[in-house]
Image (cartoon, rainbow, N blue to C red):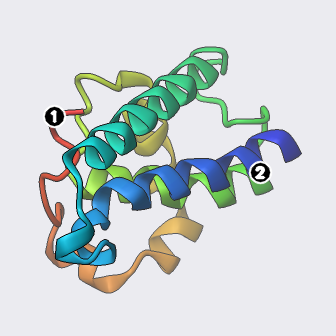
Amino acid sequence: MYQRMMEGLTLIEKLNLVVFYDMVAPEGERHDSAEKRNKENLVAELQLWESYLGNVAAGSYLAGAFSLADVVVFPNIAYAFRYGLSAERYPKMAKYYSLLKDRPSIKTTWPSQWYQIAQRSETLKDL
């Protein structure tokens, strides 16, 4: 459980480097090579999470029962889908997302603006 929980931090770091690159990197310091490298790193991380979720039993969570690992990782996965991550390319992540998004605790804490706009952008659609 702790390992997956800590690996969730790497996922959010790599997501941020792609989603917010244009906002974080000043215009004169942006490089196509950096953007390409960030996207490749994120794809590798997403594939790693697909493999982790491929080892989880159907209807189960990251560590079997719902745990702190899910509390830490789920917002990152929800965030990825909000920015256009393809459910077709990442079906295990999409299944995990669907499993958790309807939990009462998640519905209660879900940001209200996320109900109004299902997808914020298509930044991740081609990954």
> Which residue is rendered at x = 17% and y = 61% of the image?
119
Q: Which residue lies furthest to the bottom in this view?
A: 112
Q: Nearer the viewer, residue 10 or 98?
A: 10
Between 19 and 32, the one lying in front of the other is 32
Residue 86 or residue 7, whichever sits in front = 7
Is 51 left, or right, of 39 in this rendering? right
- The extreme right residue here reads 2
Q: Residue at x 58, y 28 (%)?
A: 59
* 59 is higher (above) or lower (below) than 117: above
Residue 82: image location, x then y, percent: 27, 58
The first of marks 1 and 2 along the sequence is 2
Amino acid, disc 2? Met
Q: What secondary structure is marked by label 1?
A: loop
Q: Can residue 66 be seen in this view?
A: no
For the N terminus, which image quadrant?
top right
What amino acid does circle 1 point to? Answer: Asp
Element under disc 2: helix
Q: Which mark is residue 126?
A: 1
Say which residue label 2 marks.
6
Please name the residue shown 31% across and 67% down the image: 20
Q: Rate crowding at label 2 as few (under 14), some (14 to 19) or many (20 or more) other CA atoms within 10 Å.
A: few
Name the residue at 75% across, 50% down.
5
